[in-house]
Image: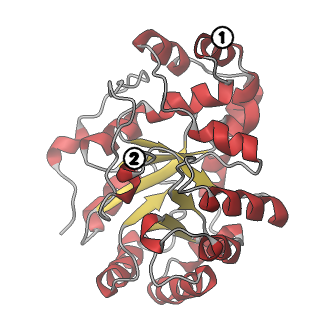
Amino acid sequence: MGHESPASHHEGRNHRPRDSGRPQNGVRLDRGDPLHRANRVDVGLGDRDQQAVERQLAYDFAVERFDRGLGYRHVDTAQAYDNEEAVGDGIARSEVDRDEVFLTTKVWRSNLGYEDVLDSVRGSLDRLGVEYVDLLLAHWPHPRVPVAETLDAMTELHESGVVKNVGVSNYTLAQLREARSAAEIPLVANQVLYHPYKDQSRLREYCAANGLALVAYSPLARGDALGDDLLERVGDRYDKTPAQVAVRWLVQQEGVVAIPKASSRAHLEQNAAVFDFSLTDHEMARISDRTGSPGVRLRNYLPALVRRVPF
């Protein structure tokens, strides 16, 4: 049982990411690769903590533009975001076939018991108005619910056809190893906080070595990257914004998918326009060496604090 291999323990500590050497990395989530056909597997649309009208605008616009050149295919939501219904409405009103959308949702940590997983995912499917989700993630680890119990329920959903792929979110390297060892089916992703001021090199290297996508949420460091002088100088060389440089830095790393949130048309377009340039190895290394201000570093630790809270 499990998918942990001995060779997977040889991850390095160097924060400087390996450049894939390609404009797009080809992270393969197993569903016939509609994302790759659209050439947008590396950037998705993330949404949390936005007002209802703003998030509806974002999803409506992104879905409507799937076939008009913007290129979003990967939409990320969660039970805890309280927007699954809005996401489902946006998809339903679009002219895009369901099988052309890669839809991710997450099970909240209070629902990680076996029966709670089954019941809550049925609720998610109802709110989304879909027959299946492409990726189901355990949103946070729970200190009192064995990960094997959660994954057993997710495996049952996978076998029934309502979940195409399973994974986790906010799992540390040790927790991810435990989850892979307990899983009856391969885990395909770990979604974590990742941006230029957050060192995820060991986790990223482990995921790349074991065929998991590392999905980066808050890739703009909750807005702190927008005023970064280095990102601005690098962006000037390519006529790109600091936000676009930050997203490009992420997706240029092997196996990394970025899900920036956006509510305006301009920001949606900017987030998608990161595949027409590549950063040099020197630029990648300089961005990786950023540490950020004390305030930025404090915000980096917030997920670790949340991880210790049961619900």
Choose the circle earlier in sequence order: 2 or 1.
2
Helix, strand or loop for disc 1: helix
Q: Nearer the viewer, residue 25 or 230?
A: 25
The residue lying at 77 percent from left, 29 percent from top is: 295
The residue lying at 66 percent from left, 10 percent from top is: 233
Quarter assignment of residue 99: bottom left
Q: Could you tell whether 95 is left or right of 212 in the image?
A: right
In this figure, which residue is indicated by the disc labeled 2?
A: 173
The residue lying at 65 percent from left, 41 percent from top is: 269
Q: Amino acid at mark 2?
A: Leu
In the rendered view, would you say 155 is above or below 27? below
In this figure, which residue is indicated by the disc labeled 1?
A: 233
From the top left corner, tell me how far across and down residue 161 is, in percent: 34, 83
In the rendered view, would you say 203 is above or below 106? above
The residue lying at 32 percent from left, 24 percent from top is: 21
Q: Amino acid at mark 1?
A: Arg
| Dot 1 crowding, Cα within 10 Å, few <14, some 14–19, many 20+ | some
Whether residue 198 appears in this view of the structure is: no
